[in-house]
Image: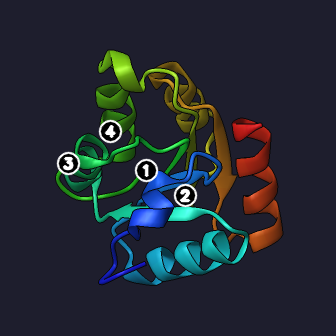
């Protein structure tokens, strides 16, 4: 990482798994970055759904997986998932919801929007990494 951006070597590496995290909580963003980078993943981040889409579109190569919160300003996680799924080149990317929500109706709504899985906050790094490995292998 150089100034928060992937190094040229990291960008050139085809073996590095990139994960986009989208969450309005700076604390969660720091925790996600620490957990994912310590497991060898490259992390790019957005602060809400709008910023997440901007980051996704600017990302080259695109991420191998996306982790998104549900409750965010401007564009919530449901809207973000739906927006990503409408873009053909990103339709295949696994998307995990990381949220304090545990309501079955919200889980179903996320699944219908195109979410691949659901992780309830607070999370532990081991289960997060296991979930990313499941969807990127």
Q: On the picture, is 88 further left or further right than 63?
A: left
- Give the mark nearest the N terminus, 1 or 2: 1
- 20 or 42, which lies in front? 42
Please tell me how crowded label 1 is: few (under 14), some (14-19), or many (20+) other residues with Cα within 10 Å: many
Q: Which mark is residue 99?
A: 2
**SS label for mark 3:** helix
Q: On the picture, is 103 further left or further right than 67?
A: right
How many discs mark residues in the rendered view?
4
Q: Comparing marks 2 and 4, which lies closer to the viewer? A: 4
Q: On the picture, is 4 further left or further right than 96?
A: left
Disc 3 and disc 4: Cα gap in Å? 11 Å
Label 4, on which residue? 80
- Give the mark nearest the N terminus, 3 or 4: 3
Please tell me how crowded label 4 is: few (under 14), some (14-19), or many (20+) other residues with Cα within 10 Å: many
Residue beneath the point at 33% across and 68% down: 24
**SS label for mark 4:** helix
Q: Position of residue 127 (x, y in %)?
A: 81, 61
- Give the mark nearest the N terminus, 1 or 3: 3
- Give the mark nearest the N terminus, 2 or 4: 4
Q: Quadrant of the C terminus?
A: top right
Q: State if disc 1 and disc 4 touch (CB < 8 Å).
A: no
Q: Comparing marks 3 and 4, which lies closer to the viewer? A: 3
Q: Comparing marks 1 and 3, which lies closer to the viewer? A: 3
Q: Which mark is residue 70?
A: 1
């Amino acid at each position: 990482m150089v100034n928060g951006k992937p190094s040229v070597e990291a960008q050139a590496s085809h073996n590095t798994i990139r994960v986009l995290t989208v969450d309005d909580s700076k604390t969660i963003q720091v925790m996600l970055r620490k957990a994912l980078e310590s497991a060898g993943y490259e992390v790019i981040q957005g602060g809400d759904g709008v910023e997440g889409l901007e980051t996704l579109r600017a990302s080259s190569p695109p991420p191998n997986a996306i982790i998104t919160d549900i409750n965010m300003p401007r564009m919530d996680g449901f809207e973000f998932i739906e927006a990503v799924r409408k873009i053909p080149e990103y339709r295949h990317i696994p998307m995990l919801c990381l949220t304090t929500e545990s309501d079955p109706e919200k889980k179903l709504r996320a699944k219908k929007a195109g979410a691949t899985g659901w992780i309830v906050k607070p999370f532990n790094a081991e289960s997060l990494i296991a979930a990313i490995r499941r969807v990127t292998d």
